[in-house]
Amino acid sequence: MGIFNIIPDSVSVSSGLFTEWTAFGVAGADLIAGLLNPTGSQGGGSYPFVVQGVNAPPPPYVVTAVDNLLRLGFSLVGNIISLDGAARISFAGLPAGFQIDTAVIHIFTENNASDATNHFKLQYASLGEESGNLGFGAVVFSYPGTLPISNLLNWWNNGIGIHVDNTVVGQQTSRNIARLSITGTWSFSYSVTSITPSPLRTDQSPIVISLHGTNMNFFPTGSLSLHFTNSAGAQVVTLPDAVIVSNILATITIVSLTGILNFTGTATLFSGSVSLGTLSILYATGSGIYRFVANQRHDTLYDRTTGSTTNVAIPMPFAETGFIGG
Amino acid sequence: MALRDHQPIAIDKFNGLWSRGDYENTPLDHFIDCNNLKFVGTSSITTRDGIGVSQTVAAPLENIKRIYNYPTSTGNTLIILIIDDAGKGSIYHLVDAANLFGPLLTIAGMTDFAFLPYAGRGYISPFATFDVGGLNVEKGLQNEFLYVYAGDGTAARKAAGAGMSGAITIANGAAGHTDAGFHLFGFVSETISGYLCPPAAISSFTTGPANSVSFGNIPTSGDANVTKRHLVATKVITSYNGDPTGYDFFFVPNATINNNTSTALNNISFFDQDLLDDASHLFDNYTEIPAGAVLTLYRNKLCLFTTYTDINLGLVSTDGEPEAINQISGLVVFPPDGNPITNAENLRDVLYVMKRSKTGSFTDNGDDPSAWPFIIVDNAIGTCVHGIATVLDSGSASVDYLIVCTYAGITMFNGRYIIPELSWKIEQFWKDLSRADFRFIQIVNAPIQKEIYVVLPDRTMLIGNYSNGMDPKKIRWTPISCSPGFNSVAIWNIDEVVIGADIEALE
């Protein structure tokens, strides 16, 4: 799991007149860029994009009241998502199984103080529009939860609209919007169709772990590492860099493992990890016929890999008394 | 309270696990949790003894699923089930640490088996667990049978067997004697395990008073395990109705061919009054005995329960002939209630039969098994397929009781379940076990160590030490575990605890 940040990479005016305030002397394209960049301060000021309705000159104020829609788009191939602060990449570059777990839409608006209502609304699709006007400041909508769409893929289908509906001539309303972004947490939900052999036996070496299905899209160059963690999440083995060949994720040799393990791949492309599923590791070397040996202070187990035996500690002898006193 | 007023509490007795009620109710000399302990003396503990390997051969058995004691005429040995990667169960005979026979029998889908040693031989019944309406049912494998193992490393073979086929020729022999008249004659083949096949090759002949009878063209059996063939005959039939199986056959004294090769038996004399040993029941015997999930011995009779087709059925053999089970009179039925028969054991000359939550009894009244009276002993308590403690290599009862794993706890049974259970101290621990997995439980009693060993569903083991007394409040309990999971346990050579571990998928 990690943290993502998404910004739009296109903007369009869906209908009517949409006006920008150029009082800061900056070209409109820059202002739009400012809207698309949530971290920058575009146009020489802190309010990169302005919408207002007024009833009087001087120019460049718009004298016409507006009821328009500015739509911000998200493309699949543009570099719009940053994972854990890394450079932005495209959604097409994300591995299959990437999913957004939680999301918050941020947008900054500012009133021009002549109207208690800013007349901005966010519109997520043609079917859904946030019911009330945006408040001032950093307004957030949480996902899952109150976001009025069922699937975040709608962002890519419909973008996010900014609906300006100030139709009162002469009223100067909210004029500044900026810093639209979507942030939240992500993880991978990966369906491993088979890992062979499954269950894994520790006496079978090497063990080829193959992922069948969608390409993982891990493209590290020698920097992918594989980790086995036990059911409690503790990492018990770190394997050396693995080589990805087609859908074969790794060829590894397990010498001795215990527990049901989560097989986790971590790549530099993403700082998070991908849980590939649960592997049952069969401790084959331990199976056999045993007997208690009086006064022996360790367990002697068969070791199928060497054909001999191995001594291991008796697992965690302990006794815990009940509460004493009160 | 000032520290100097503190009265220290000395704990100098350690009496094992306590798991019932709140932690705060745990007696000071008991543990709320413990593992891998061994009880020393009357109230001390130490780390359990380590385990060591039990086979010294280069390729020891692996993936052990079940171990039974197998006393043979020459020693106390073990019979062992392993399961390979393909899911095939194979049974081996471990003679000692360095000598292993097998596989004696390999069957796909055999995840467990019932075993009964008898006269040096071993009777093997493969079974598995089936999901029947959400209930795990252990019953004999479909289209599988009871097998017999000779104990000598040869492969196990199907118990019982079919009669021979063919037609014999009969003629008057040398001077001798018979009760003159119309007789039916046939031959019964006998296998190496003493099983008598149904009379076959039946022909009629009218004997004379002053002649013996000679037989020719006697068929040989295609079964390589046949070692003898016996002549059987009817008494004089005054009015033959044409049905050769409709008459009582008897073994003719001194008319046995001690091989499976000769085709002639000449000059046999007998009178009808010599025909005492009845062979008629052999017609009705199973020639293939269906596999079941339970085997036990009662009054020298082999008893097999829970076949694939009938989970309430028991098959009981003839006295001393474990493979001779009459398909009509050898059947006993536990009244059906949707639950399979899971276990059966002899105690005080009564055959107790258990389901998972019910116990009943059959008593041999001298009549055929089908006429034995059935009595419900307990309508709420029963056990699982390996839930009756075996004692050393003998099978079951120690002294005059059984130790039974029930849903309520580990309970002594002497004709009734004794309350409180032996596991009274650890009632919560026991009741936390998954009932659906009780089939994995196996219990043995080691009277020399004065300990009970119970393999649990999670493949750890529970040890009950009763050196302070076989009493619910004196017995001391501790779980133990090791890196390989425990699957089976047996007592070997009087007091050697043998553990079977399979390929492990640790939790």
Image: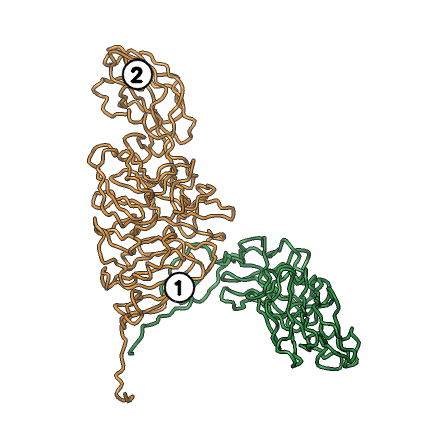
Query: Is B13 on the left or on the right of A167, as rendered?
Result: left
Q: From the viewer's side, name the closer residue of B252 and A134.
A: A134
In the rendered structure, find residue B297 and report the number of the disc placed on it: none
Residue at the spot of label 2: B184
Subunit under mark 2: B
* Numbered label tally: 2
Q: Residue at x 28, y 78 (%)?
A: A325
Q: Residue at x 56, y 66 (%)?
A: A146
**Element at badge 2?**
strand
User: Which x, y percent locates residue A296?
Assistant: 39, 65
Q: Is residue A37 above or below residue B6?
A: above
Distance of mark 2 from mark 1, alpha carbons? Answer: 67 Å
Q: Which chain is green?
A: A
Q: Earlier in the sequence, mark 2 or mark 1?
A: 1
**Element at badge 1?**
strand
Three-letter amino acid code of the residue under disc 2? Leu
Colour in which chain B is drawn: orange
Question: Could you classify mark 1 by the number of other residues whose Cα lies within 10 Å: few (under 14), some (14-19), or many (20 or more)?
Answer: many
Q: Is residue A70 above or below residue B222?
A: below
User: Which x, y percent locates residue A298?
Assistant: 42, 66
User: Which x, y percent locates residue A172?
Assistant: 69, 78
Q: Residue at x 45, y 59 (%)?
A: B484
Residue B174 appears in which quarter of the rendering? top left
In the rendered structure, find residue B50 and report the number of the disc placed on it: 1
